[in-house]
């Protein structure tokens, strides 16, 4: 029988985890925090329990942008939160919308571009 190694999860940095826990306490609900971050409640639960199997660095950026007021300078939109920047990066390019078309071009070379896992 093959032995399986226990999975090792990357943890949130302490200050980011504290900000996430503070948000849960402030909103009194993991579900409301999940809505704020545009993720599922399971993501919040697994992050708080140090068992998130996904891209922890990306989630840290979302949490910093939403709950720690970290911003970036977008070449198209100006100053905005890291979370909104990440949301815009996830949108498909749309040539029928001039802002989205500009974002599609600018995001490719932007220093704020998320790291792909």
Image: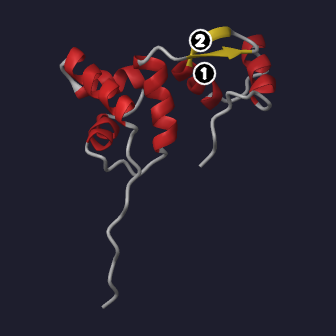
CB under 8 Å between callouts 2 and 1?
Answer: yes
> Residue 58: horizontal and vertical position, in percent?
52, 37
How many angstroms separate mark 2 from mark 1 (CA)? Answer: 7 Å
Q: Could you tell whether 107 is left or right of 24 in the image?
A: right
At 42% from the left edge and 18% from the top edge, which residue is drawn? Answer: 68
Q: Judge the density around disc 2: few (<14), some (14-19), many (≥20) Cα neighbours within 10 Å.
A: some
At 20% from the left edge and 20% from the top edge, which residue is drawn? Answer: 25
> Residue 83: horizontal and vertical position, in percent?
52, 22
* Numbered tag placed on residue 39 in the rendering: none
Residue ranking furthest to the front:
14
Q: Please report whichever mark, 2 or 1, sits nearer to the chain's N-terminal start.
A: 2
Tell me the residue that label 2 is attached to: 80
Q: Judge the density around disc 1: few (<14), some (14-19), many (≥20) Cα neighbours within 10 Å.
A: many
> Residue 9: horizontal and vertical position, in percent?
38, 55
The foreground one among 106 and 79 is 79
Asked which quadrant contains residue 72, the reply is: top right
Is label 2 in a helix, a strand or a loop?
Answer: strand
Number of on-image labels = 2
Q: Does 116 sit above or below residue 101?
A: below
């Amino acid at each position: 029988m093959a032995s399986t190694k226990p999975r090792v999860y990357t943890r949130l940095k302490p200050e980011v985890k504290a900000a996430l826990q503070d948000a849960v306490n402030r909103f009194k609900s993991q579900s409301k925090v999940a809505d704020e971050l545009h993720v599922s409640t399971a993501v919040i639960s697994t992050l708080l329990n140090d068992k998130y199997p996904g891209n922890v660095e990306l989630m840290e950026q979302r949490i910093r942008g939403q709950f720690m007021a970290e911003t970036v300078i977008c070449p198209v939109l100006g100053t905005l939160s890291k979370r909104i920047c990440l949301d815009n990066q996830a949108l498909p390019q749309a040539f029928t919308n001039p802002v989205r078309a500009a974002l599609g071009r600018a995001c490719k070379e932007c220093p704020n571009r998320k790291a792909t896992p």
